[in-house]
Structure formats: C-alpha cells, structure tokens
Image (cartoon, helix red, strand yellow):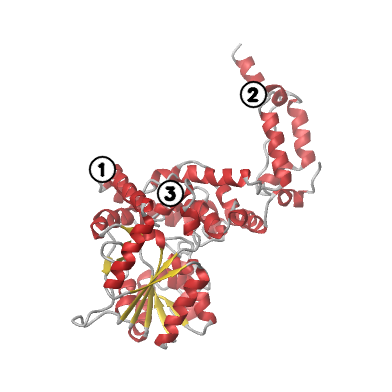
C-alpha cells in the first residue's frame, strides 16, 4: 500500500492524544532556544545532584531502605490509611476521602464557601494540579494565588507547571524578567534577586489576609496522623500558618509508617530533587492550632485522593509505581524529556514516572502512547531513590496495550509483517540495497523520521554478506 506522506503516520496512530503528542514533540525537539534553556537548567541540577549523592557514605543502602519502607506501605496500604485517618481525627483534623477530581474539587469548594473566603493561598502541590483546582476555583469566582515562586511564574504566564519539582524550568531569567515587566511593570532587566524580592513583597499581604490556605503533603505519617511538608521558600509554612483554615490534598500513596522514617526520606528526597542536604523548611503539621498555641489554623481538613490510584494499586506489577516520592530525578535523567520537555506529555505527571502512571490514572487506551515515548535506556531506573523499575513498568504497559489490541489494526499488521521478515535471514538478505531504497522511497518511509531528518540509505550488501566477506 502506498500512503500519502501527510497521512502516513496518522494512519498508524491510535488516537487524538497520540497525534497531539507526536506533533508537539516534533515541534519542540527542533526549537533550539527551548532546548538550550532546558539543557542549561538541567545541567545545573546535574551538578547539584552529583554533590548531593557524594554526601552519602552508602547511597545504595539508603535507597534500599527507602525502597523497603515504600514497599512495606504498599503491602499494607489500606491499614496504614485507616491508621492515619484515626490518628488525624484524634489530633483534631477532619478527614475526607475523594474518589476523583470532581469529588475533591467539590469538597474544597464547600469548605471555602463555609469560610466565606474570596481568596485562597496555595503552596506548590502537584495533586492540586492533578484535579485542576485553580480552574475550578476561578470558575466559582474564587481567587487562587500560587505562592511558590516557580508556580507563581507559570500562573502569571497563564501556563501549567512544566516539571514536577521545577515548575518554570522552561523559562530563562530573561524570559521571566520580560514576563514580570509586561505584567507588573518591573524593570525589563531585573535580576533574579530583584524579581524574587518583588514577589515576596507582593505575597506578604495576601498571606496575612487570606482565610484559606491549601497545601499538598510530601508524606502522610500514619502513626502520628500528621502531614510532612518540605520546601525551600517558606511559602508552604505561611500557607498553612496564617489562614484560619488549612486544606491538605494528598494522594493515598503518600503514606509513611511514622515520623521516624523522615530522617531517611527527607534527605533522600532533597538530594535527588535539588541536590541539597535537606530543604530549607521542613514542617510536620499535627492538626489545627491548639488553645495554648497563639498561631496556626483554627481548622485543618485533609482530603485523601484516589483518582485512579486504587486501579493502579490493584495491578500486580505496575502498582510498584505508587512508591514514587516525586523527586523528579527520572525526568532530569530522561533523554526524551530533555528533548521534548514537560508540556508535550499533556499530563500533570510527565517524564518516565508520568508515562507509567498517567495511563492508569486517566485511561490506558487514551494515554497509551506515553509508555511508548521512551528509549528504554534505563537511566530513570538507575536514578530512582526508591528503586522503581521504571523501564520494566513501561514495558508492562506496552504489553497490556498490545495484548488488549489497543493499537491500530494497520500497525498490528505492519508489526506482524516485520516480525515475519526480521525473523528470516533469507528475507532480510533478499532484494539488495538498491531494491530496498527504491521501496523505501515508494512508501514514503522518510515521513516516519520527520521533515528534519533523512532516513539513511540501505547498504548495497546486507550485514550478513558484509560479515562473510570481511571474515573470509
């Protein structure tokens, strides 16, 4: 069959999301300014990461311990969650369970309306991004202000976070200065220090007047019924300590057995996330402020979010991905992410971990392509602090897609033909290079590598024939 070049790739793709992904990946991969910005920012991370790893006398032992703890949690997740709920309520917190994004959004909106708040302050939280909370609040007429500097930048730009740990990784300091100049009339050549000072002053009044603060949780501590937050700017601390109401939205997989585990997990998270010994602000919040405490919220509400996690949990193999502590190391190591960036994935969770979990959170059929967007180089598995075998899990997803016959019929036919041809030495050697080059041009095979690359010519002699000649 001869395809028109413009339609050839689309004919073999399975869905709209996949078409968008490939189109955006092709565009971004050859946006050299964008590539240079990512390369520069990730190179700084890599230098910090190497220093962070070097501080450990035995990093492998630390990773083994962390992996063991997270697998222990997964093995008894229902029991740990029940223990957390019981102890959190004893501490004076309210605990809600949300099956999906809508339920989580409705609970939060109800609490905000009960508080009669018009403005809420938010610390950095990928879980709130997952349920599209800002969009929901805006629709309800509530002003939601991001207080993390990176999140604030992308919110002002009308964008979503680009990276799990570094939301504005795709922007240079020149880009941010131009954005702030346009939005706030700050100097067009403002330095990073000047821009940070401007944002700090701008947010201080908001912290003092907001009635509701919303945070995520890096970890949920089952034995204590408390939440653990780690950050570098103090915005998380102020988001829960100033407002009267503190709302926590956390995925059900964030559980740790107890406070005792933080001495391992916090340094491991910071070393892999930013290269630090430990992040600047580390808080354990046990509940609302007590009568003897002059500060703190009057009400603390913890929402435990499922949103596809139970489905993933019930998969015997891929459930291991729920051990993730969201350090972002796999994104920074991934050659695909480093070339196509965060937005191409069209998902809150990008990179290798996102490619494993998103198809199960949002639907394997619709998001199957993410598990194929990997070179399987293995780097993501090497750097994971809790030893999640990400390359193997990507393959498990691919297997489920193929077994479930979710790929297009034409692609399945092509793959079957390739299996037949590649398994036969006679078929591989037949035809010669001239015939294969003619057939490649006839079918428009260059379309598969895109307009910016050339499909290489086949050699006149097959590899096996060249080998025989060379080794006579």
Q: Which of the marked residues, 3 or 1, is nearer the chain's N terminus?
A: 1
Q: Residue at x 44, y 85 (%)?
A: 113
Which residue is nearer to you in this view: 196 or 136? 136
* Picture residue at 38% right of the left edge, 81% below the top: 212
Which residue matches tag 3? 320
Select label 1 or label 2 by which is in front: 1
Query: In front: 113, or 333?
Result: 113
Residue 413: image quadrant is top right
- Return the x and y of residue 147 as percentages of the image width and height: 39, 74
Label 3: how many Cα within 10 Å (few below 14, some 14–19, many 20+): many
Quarter that holds the N terminus: top right
Determine whether label 2 and label 3 are within 8 Å by CB: no
Q: CA distance from mark 2 to mark 3?
A: 41 Å
Q: Earlier in the sequence, mark 2 or mark 3?
A: 3
Q: Vertically, is 33 above or below 389?
A: below
Depth order, front residue of 115/133: 115
Q: Residues within 10 Å of mark 1 (few under 14, many from 20)?
A: few
Image location of residue 280, percent across then percent down: 27, 65
**Quick one: which residue is furthest to the bottom in this view?**
116
Mark positioned earlier in the residue sequence (1 or 2) = 1
Q: Which mark is residue 463?
A: 2
Provide residue 393's location: percent of width, then percent of height.
Answer: 49, 45
Q: Nearer the viewer, residue 68 or 232?
A: 68
Residue 211, labelled with which disc?
A: none
- Residue at label 1? 58
Measure the C-alpha gap from mark 3 to mark 1: 24 Å
Q: Quadrant of residue 85?
A: bottom left
Mark 2 crowd level (few <14, some 14–19, many ≥20, 10 Å Cα) = few
Task: Report if the CB atoms under discs 3 and 1 are less than 8 Å apart.
Answer: no
* In the image, residue 455 above or below residue 95: above
Q: Which residue is at 72% across, 52% downward? A: 10
């Amino acid at each position: 069959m001869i395809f028109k070049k413009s339609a050839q790739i689309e004919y073999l793709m399975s869905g709209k999301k996949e078409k968008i992904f490939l189109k955006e990946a092709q565009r971004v991969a050859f946006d050299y300014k964008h590539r240079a910005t990512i390369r520069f920012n990730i190179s700084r991370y890599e230098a910090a990461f190497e220093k962070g790893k070097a501080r450990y006398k035995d990093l492998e032992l630390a990773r083994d311990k962390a992996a063991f703890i997270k697998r222990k949690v997964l093995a008894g997740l229902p029991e740990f969650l029940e223990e957390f709920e019981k102890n959190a309520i004893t501490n004076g917190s309210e605990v809600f369970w949300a099956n999906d994004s809508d339920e989580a959004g409705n609970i939060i909106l109800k609490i905000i309306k009960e508080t009669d708040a018009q403005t809420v302050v938010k610390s950095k939280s990928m879980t709130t991004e997952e349920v599209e909370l800002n969009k929901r609040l805006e629709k309800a007429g509530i002003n939601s202000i991001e207080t993390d500097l990176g999140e604030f930048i992308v919110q002002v730009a009308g964008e979503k976070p680009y990276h799990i740990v570094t939301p504005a990784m795709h922007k240079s300091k020149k880009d941010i200065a131009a954005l702030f100049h346009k939005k706030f009339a700050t100097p067009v050549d403002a330095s990073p220090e000047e821009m940070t000072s401007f944002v700090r002053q701008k947010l201080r009044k908001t912290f003092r007047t907001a009635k509701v603060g919303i945070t995520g949780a890096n970890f949920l501590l089952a034995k204590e019924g408390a939440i653990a937050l780690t950050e570098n700017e103090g915005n998380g601390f102020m988001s829960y300590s100033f407002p009267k109401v503190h709302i926590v939205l956390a995925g059900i997989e964030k559980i740790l057995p107890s406070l005792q585990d933080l001495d391992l997990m916090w340094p491991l998270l910071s070393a892999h996330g930013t290269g630090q010994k430990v992040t600047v602000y580390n808080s354990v919040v046990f509940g609302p402020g007590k009568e003897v405490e002059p500060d703190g919220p009057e009400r603390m509400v913890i929402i435990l979010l499922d949103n596809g996690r139970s489905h993933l949990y019930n998969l015997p193999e891929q459930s291991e991905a729920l051990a993730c502590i969201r350090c972002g190391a796999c994104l920074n190591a991934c050659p695909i992410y480093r070339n196509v960036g965060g937005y191409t994935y069209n998902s809150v969770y990008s990179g290798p971990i996102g490619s494993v979990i998103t198809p199960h959170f949002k639907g394997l059929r619709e998001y199957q392509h993410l598990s194929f967007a990997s070179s399987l180089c293995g780097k993501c598995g090497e750097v994971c602090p809790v030893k999640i075998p990400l390359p193997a899990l990507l393959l498990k997803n691919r297997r489920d897609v193929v077994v479930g016959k979710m790929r297009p019929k034409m692609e399945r036919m092509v793959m079957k033909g390739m299996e037949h041809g590649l398994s036969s030495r006679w078929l591989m050697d037949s035809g010669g290079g001239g015939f294969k080059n003619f057939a490649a041009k006839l079918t428009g095979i260059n379309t598969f590598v895109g307009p910016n690359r050339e499909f290489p010519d086949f050699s006149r002699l097959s590899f096996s024939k060249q080998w025989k000649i060379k080794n006579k």
